[in-house]
Amino acid sequence: MKKQYITLGLLLLMTASYGQDKFTKEADKLFENYQYIEAIDEYLKLTESKNANAYVFTKLADSYYNISKMDEAEKWYVKAIQNQANAAVYYRYAQTLKALGNYPEANKQMDIFVSLLPNDVRSQEYKANPNYIQKLNRQYKMFDIATMDINSKDQSDFGAVLTDDNTLYFVSTRNTSQKIDKWVDRPYQDIYEAIRNSNGTFSEPKPVSELNTPFHDGPVTISSDGKTMYFARDGHSSKLYERNKDNVKISQQGIYKATKIDGKWTNIEALPFNSTAYSVTNPSLSRDGKTLYFASNMPGGMGESDIWRVRIDANGYGKPENLGSAVNTQEKENFPFIANDDILYYASSGKQGFGGLDLFKIDLKSMGQAVNLGKPINSGKDDFALTINENKNIGFFASNRSGKDAIYTAIPICSVEAIAMVTNEKTGDLIANASVVILDNKGNSIATKQSDSEGKARYRIDCEKAYAFLVTAPNFEPASFPVQKVKSREVLVKAPLSPIEEIIAFNPIYFDFDKKNITKEGVSELDKLITVMKNHPASMILIKSHTDSRGNAEYNQKLSEKRAQSTMQYLISNGIEKERISGEGLGSSEPRINCTNCTKEQYAKNRRSEFIIINK
């Protein structure tokens, strides 16, 4: 018979245990051998016959899911559910809907999954935080990302890693003379390299010929001295395979070690825990060269694929160790990268994310909760294979958000938590419900929070930029406090406020409906305020601007900010130094008159700018 070569990767399948019979035998054989493209053709034929049932629809949907054709997967999961699918199908359907950005419908399917399997870990996690997408959307940005010119036009590129000598290694299927992998209907992947220039551009990629074979090679990880490489390779290349009952050669991915001598990679050797029974792939070497992290579906794991590690010493390799439930789930965990500070980055489809594979990080020293890296590095598609060169402050990851696997740069954003602790300067007592405005280096208001019962207000800030806190509280003088630039995890800013000696309150000024302009009546009141401020040159003023409740929250917020700006500009144009003025727009969140069916007069009273002036 014709020779066939099949490599079993790590995207293992969620198969249903019902409905398989002699009519699906040929399609199932292709599916089980990861030949999804050909399996789809066979299952499609079955959908048009009297043998079409939930099993056929599910396998067809799974086939499309595993080649990331989510629109088609969704269509056939719907058909499967209409024909009494099992719980696993509802879960996979929910994942598909997330990948398509339909989060409300995904939650409905998860509700059904939870009702069918209430004790499942995935059910318990979902019940604990069903609206996690909203939280992820509000999460601070950890990376700036950009596309790269080294990507091929229509082939798959991923697994980029930059060495300290500016060599970028990555994996690509751009060699169209290679054999075709029937799993994804693309050529087998090769290892490539490109040189990063001083201006940040890259040279034309070229294959690393001494590492490439007719089958899959890569991704790679490089030792800190650049002399040792560990890389994934298809078992066919080293004749590490088994034949199934149809005489098809079935191989697994394994990890291999190579040494760089005279500019070439040589002395290639297989690691001792490679196997024909399971895959070992996607290695990442610790900076000290003593621990190798990898992904595998070897026995003792928790899900379809897990993250493992193995110790390396002078005598060889220890016993592979599963990283446990803090890292791994019942789904897929893959593409580990270990950073210098024992922070593990990896991809997971089993933790709460935007859809497909999402990128996470976890501190292996504390083994706390894994953190989703958020947008823009994560999307509704597969996002994976993140690596970071910390010496050069640049990272790379892969995503199929454009329709194919492509490499993106990921520049880490240095961020810290800045904490204002508000106290009474004279007594030392904590002050709750103080207004803490964070200002940028130009004095512009970014956001406002209230101090909590411990007198603290917390902000996530860029550690490379200058900020200040403007703090106000009833019966205290407002004050500003600079935020020191630091690269630690947090910076505590003590914000003691002095009890006020004298408060001069002014009447609010009012605005016409949907307008930001200062009215004639408003000018009269502001002129009184200007006179007082000029007579008290050490005084400061806080402006709070509001709208009525008509209009949506976003529009009202922007309108109130415009009213605050026009009020501030009037004062500045009449000789009041801008450093003495701060303002914020509060939209319709703090009405003077809280009404539902407001009268015209009540609406008018809520459209205002209010002032507090402190005379020192």
Image (spheres, rainbow, N blue to C red):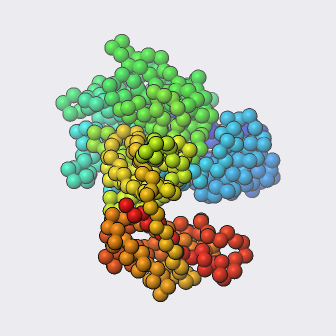
Q: Is residue 521 left or right of residue 162?
A: right
Can you name the residue that lies furthest to the bottom here?
Answer: 520
The x, y position of residue 5, in whole percent, is 51, 36
Residue positioned 53% across, 42% down in the render: 454
Can you name the residue that lies furthest to the front here?
Answer: 501
Residue positioned 38% across, 76% down in the render: 530
Does residue 2 appear in this view? no
The x, y position of residue 134, in whole percent, is 59, 54
Report the label total: 0
Does residue 467 appear in this view? yes
Q: 324 or 607, which is in the foreground?
A: 607
The quadrant the C terminus occupies is bottom left
Where, by quadrant of the figure, is residue 190 drawn?
top left
Q: 134 or 169, which is in the foreground?
A: 134
Residue positioned 29% across, 24% down in the render: 267
Q: Is residue 193 left or right of residue 181?
A: left
Residue positioned 60% across, 34% down in the render: 329
Where, by quadrant of the figure, is residue 467 drawn?
bottom left
* Up/down of 361 relative to 510, above or below: above
The x, y position of residue 161, in whole percent, is 34, 41
